[in-house]
Image: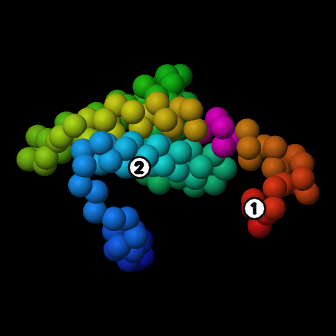
Amino acid sequence: MLLIGIFIDIFNWMIPDIETLGAQIAMFMIGLFIGGYGVGLYVAPRIGAGPRDSLMLLLVEKTGLSISVIRTSMEVSVAFIGWLLGGPVGIGTIAVALFTGKIVQISLPQFERLLKRIIEKGTDVPPILKI
């Protein structure tokens, strides 16, 4: 938690200012996919998720609904509450609220299968994934 600000500064320094709308949309979409896949990556081992992701997993388990439906409901609810409190809600906020759940729905099973393969094969892990 202490390093978040430092990493944001580093990434802001590394990523150039993007002037064109098309490039801004492309960068946003790349970030959206990285964020959704990041959730799948860190939740897949089931060894501790953050509060929002733990709530998502619990609601999926208790309701039987898909990750996509639960996560989208959570994101839309949080965006709406933020808007009621006076926060800005733009097209990016709406896109994140509507698509993060779908991306996590796809990425989580992929990383669970990858983790299972790594555990089962042990030494046949690609060198980049060896710890």
- Left or right of 123? Residue 42 is left
- Left or right of 41? Residue 123 is right
Q: Which residues are magenta?
A: 108-112
Name which quarter of the figure residue 83 lies in: top left
Q: Is residue 103 above or below residue 69?
A: below
Neighbor class of circle 1 (other Cα within 10 Å; few <14, some 14-19, many 20+) is: few
Q: Position of residue 86 (x, y in %)?
A: 8, 47
Residue under label 2, please give it: 31
Q: Residue at position x 23%, y 55% from top?
A: 19
Q: Residue at position x 74%, y 47% from top?
A: 115
Neighbor class of circle 2 (other Cα within 10 Å; few <14, some 14-19, many 20+) is: few
- Label 1, label 2: how far apart the Cα atoms are: 23 Å
The quarter of the rendered structure image containing the C terminus is bottom right
Q: Residue at position x 33%, y 65% from top?
A: 16
Answer whether labels 1 and 2 touch (C-beta < 8 Å).
Answer: no
Name which quarter of the figure residue 17 lies in: bottom left
Inspect the image, locate mark 1, and give the three-letter code of the amino acid beneath it.
Ile
- Left or right of 37? Residue 55 is left
Q: Nearer the viewer, residue 11 or 109?
A: 11
Query: Callout 2: helix, strand or loop?
Result: helix
Residue under label 1, please give it: 128
Inspect the image, locate mark 2, and give the three-letter code of the amino acid beneath it.
Gly
Query: Callout 1: helix, strand or loop?
Result: helix
Please tell me whether residue 30 belongs to the stretch shown in magenta: no
- Left or right of 41? Residue 94 is left
Answer yes or no: is residue 69 visible.
yes
Q: Is residue 113 above or below residue 4?
A: above
Q: Nearer the viewer, residue 54 or 16?
A: 16
Farthest top residue in view: 64
